[in-house]
Amino acid sequence: MARGNSKTDTGANLGFEAKLWQAADALRNNMDAAEYKHVVLGLIFLKYISDAFEAKHTELEAQRKQGADPEDRDEYLAANIFWVPKEARWQHLKASAPQSKIGTIVDDAMAAAGLKKPDISILSDEFLAEVRGMRQRNLAIELLQKLLKGEIKARGKRNVVQARSFAELLEQAVRKYQNRAIETAQVIEELIALARDMRAANARGEELKLTEEELAFSDALEKNDSAVKVLGDETLRDIARELVQTVRANVTIDWTIRENVRAQLRVLVKRILRRYGYPPDLQEKATLTVLEQAEVLSELWAAA
C-alpha cells in the first residue's frame, strides 16, 4: 500500500491514510470520543484487508471471459486473500459514515469479514509501516496499545510466562511515554518492535520443535536464567516435553480446588526437576510457575 502524493490523491488513487480519515472525519459529530476511537480502529483493519480484496476483485473482473467470477469466495481463499462481503467493503463503509449507527455498522462489517476484533496476527510489516506514518500519532499509539493488550490477554490463556513478560514490556514503554521520558515517535517505534517480537514468539515453538504446550512449560522453566546455564536448552526442552505428558495425564476436572491433587502434581513436577538436575534452589519457584501454567492449559484441555 504505497503512500500517495498529496497533490494527486483524489478519487480512486486517494492514499490509505487520506481515505481513512476522510471517512473518519464524518463520524466525529455522531458519537462520543471513546466510541469514535473504537470505530476508527475497526476502519483501519477493514481498510487494510479491503485493499488486497479490491485489487483481486479488479483482476477477476478483467478475467470474466476466462470464467472468473469476482464474487466467488474461493477465488480469494485460493489466493490467500481475505474474502470481504459487500457489507464490509470500503465503499459501503464510506457511504455509511454519516449514519449515527456507524459503530454498529463497523462491528457488523468486522464480523462479516470473519474478524471478531483487530488481531495482531494479520499485521504485516507493510501495515505497521502505515501505522508508523500516520499523522494522527496519538491514535497510532492507541491502536498499537489496543492490539498489543488484546494479544497479551489471548496469550495469557496459553502461555502465562510469555504474556507476563510482554505485559511488563508494554507497561514500561507506555509509562516512559506518559512520564515524558520518550517522545511520541519513539514510543510508536517501541510498540511496533514489541508487536514484531510477539509475532516472532509465535514461530519459536516450531523452530525449537516444541508444541505450543511444551513451549509454554519450557518458558516456565527458562524463566530462571541460571537454570538455562546449568542444564542447557536441550535438557530444558526434554523436561518440558515430560511435564506436558505427566501433567496432562494427572489433572482432573476439579484438581485446582483439591489440595491433595495439587500436592500430588507438585510432587510429580519436583521429581522430574530433580531427576534432570534442575538447580535445587530454583525448584520451588519453578514448580509454582509450572502449576500456574498447568491451570491455564488444563482449561483448554477440558474444552477440547
Image (cartoon, grey):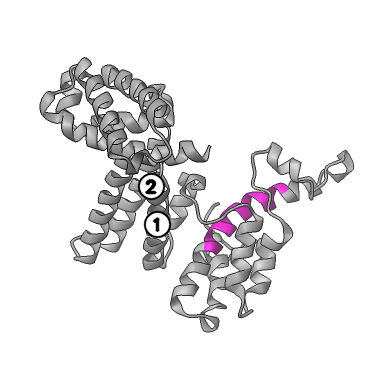
Instruction: Identify the element where label 1 is drawn.
Output: helix
Please identify the quarter of the rendering in which residue 218 is found.
top left
Left or right: residue 272 compared with residue 213: left
Q: Is residue 288 left or right of residue 55?
A: left
Question: What's the residue type where badge 1 is placed?
Answer: Leu
Residue depicted at 69% across the width and 67% down the height: 92
- The vertical placement of 59 against 267, above or below, is below
The image shows residue 193 at horizontal and vertical percentages of 34, 46
Q: Is residue 144 magenta?
A: no
Q: Is residue 5 left or right of residue 86?
A: left
Question: Which residue: 30% across, 32% down?
Answer: 219
Q: Position of residue 7 (x, y in %)?
A: 55, 67
The answer to whether residue 45 shows anywhere in this view is: yes
Q: Is residue 276 visible?
A: no
Residue 182 vs residue 88, the one in the foreground = 88
In the picture as drawn, the residue positioned furthest to the left comes out as 281
Q: Which mark is residue 8?
A: none
Q: Position of residue 57 (x, y in %)?
A: 74, 50
N-term mark: 1 or 2: 1
**Residue that label 2 marks:** 195
Query: To which residue does mark 1 refer?
Result: 144
Three-letter amino acid code of the residue under disc 2: Ala
User: Callout 1: 10 Å neighbours few (<14), some, many (20+)?
Assistant: many
